[in-house]
Image (cartoon, rainbow, N blue to C red):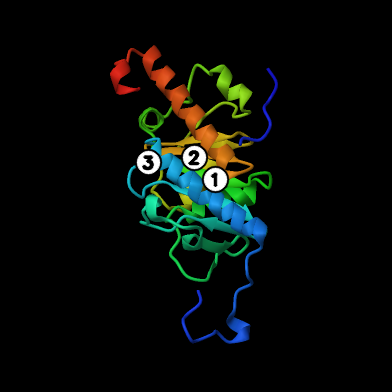
Amino acid sequence: MGAPASLPARAAGLARPAAARLPLPGAGARRRARAVVTAARALLDEGHVVGSVGNVSARVGRELRITPTRAAYERMRPRDLVRVDLATGAVRGAGVPSRELPLHLALYRARPDVGAVVHTHSVAATAWSFLGEALAPELEDLGYYDVGAVATAPAAPAGSAELARGAVAALGGGGAVLLGGHGVLTVGRTPEDAVVVARVVERQARVAWLLRGADPRLVG
């Protein structure tokens, strides 16, 4: 079976001094921002995250757009995303990025092919992450979507450089990695692609738990 095609402020009355204005985003940047918000809402609607946990980002030229911390996905708009310089990690404009910003930055810097990053706390895959094992056996889905083997990175504090280093190492050139005792991290060319990988990983984890005798009612 062959691999599929890509799946699918300005303050009132006061203008900033010209030197302080940020460049206006182009059509491509706006499209990527909308895709990040759509992906975040899909994760919430499908139960991969609860409330405002998890995070989504996309590469936009030399920047990334990332979901802000503690922001409700159902009310989020593209303008709420935080702009971050990929090289320096400096926030451009307003907003406070997700605390997992170091994780996203590390992945984009290590993987020039990655255009989007998704982090979830989906139930079956997150539960598996506490085992410290790779997901097994590997379903055909992992090969079909070019995800590859799904390893588990060592447990590390959320938002830490240690977590970022471990995730990059465990991910390698693959499409997904489990964060030990924490959750799931997936990458793709677009936010939509990364969400598809997150769905595939959660399904893989459900099958893995069933093969270990888990109650089907608990793993969907």
Q: Are marks 2 and 3 in contact (CB under 8 Å)?
A: no
Q: Amino acid at mark 2?
A: Leu
Which badge, 2 or 3, comes first in the chain's sequence? 3
Q: Secondary structure at mark 3?
A: loop
Q: Are marks 3 and 1 in contact (CB under 8 Å)?
A: no
Q: Quadrant of residue 173?
A: top right
Where, quadrant-wise, is the N terminus in this rendering? top right
**What residue sits 50% from the left and 63% below the top?**
79
Say which residue label 2 marks. 185
- In the rendered image of this protein, does residue 138 appear above or below residue 148? above
**What residue sits 48% from the left and 31% below the top?**
199
Q: Secondary structure at mark 1?
A: strand
Which badge, 3 or 1, comes first in the chain's sequence? 3
Q: Is residue 57 visible?
A: no
Q: Quadrant of residue 98?
A: bottom left
Q: Are marks 1 and 2 in contact (CB under 8 Å)?
A: yes
Which badge, 1 or 2, comes first in the chain's sequence? 1
Query: Does 80 sit left or right of 189 as displayed?
Result: left
Say which residue label 1 marks. 117
- Residue 72 place in picture, x, y as percent: 36, 53
Q: Amino acid at mark 1?
A: Val
Neighbour tally class for label 2: few under 14, some 14-19, many 20 plus, Cα within 10 Å: many
- In the rendered image of this protein, does residue 186 appear above or below residue 207? below
- Of the two numbered discs 2 and 3 in the rendering, the one whose residue sits closer to the viewer: 3
> How far is mark 1 from mark 2, CA to CA?
7 Å
Neighbour tally class for label 1: few under 14, some 14-19, many 20 plus, Cα within 10 Å: many
**What residue sits 64% from the left and 72% below the top?**
23
> How far is mark 3 from mark 1, CA to CA?
15 Å
Viewer-side residue, 104 vs 218: 218
- In the rendered image of this protein, does residue 30 appear above or below residue 143? below
Say which residue label 3 marks. 49
- Of the two numbered discs 3 and 1 in the rendering, the one whose residue sits closer to the viewer: 3
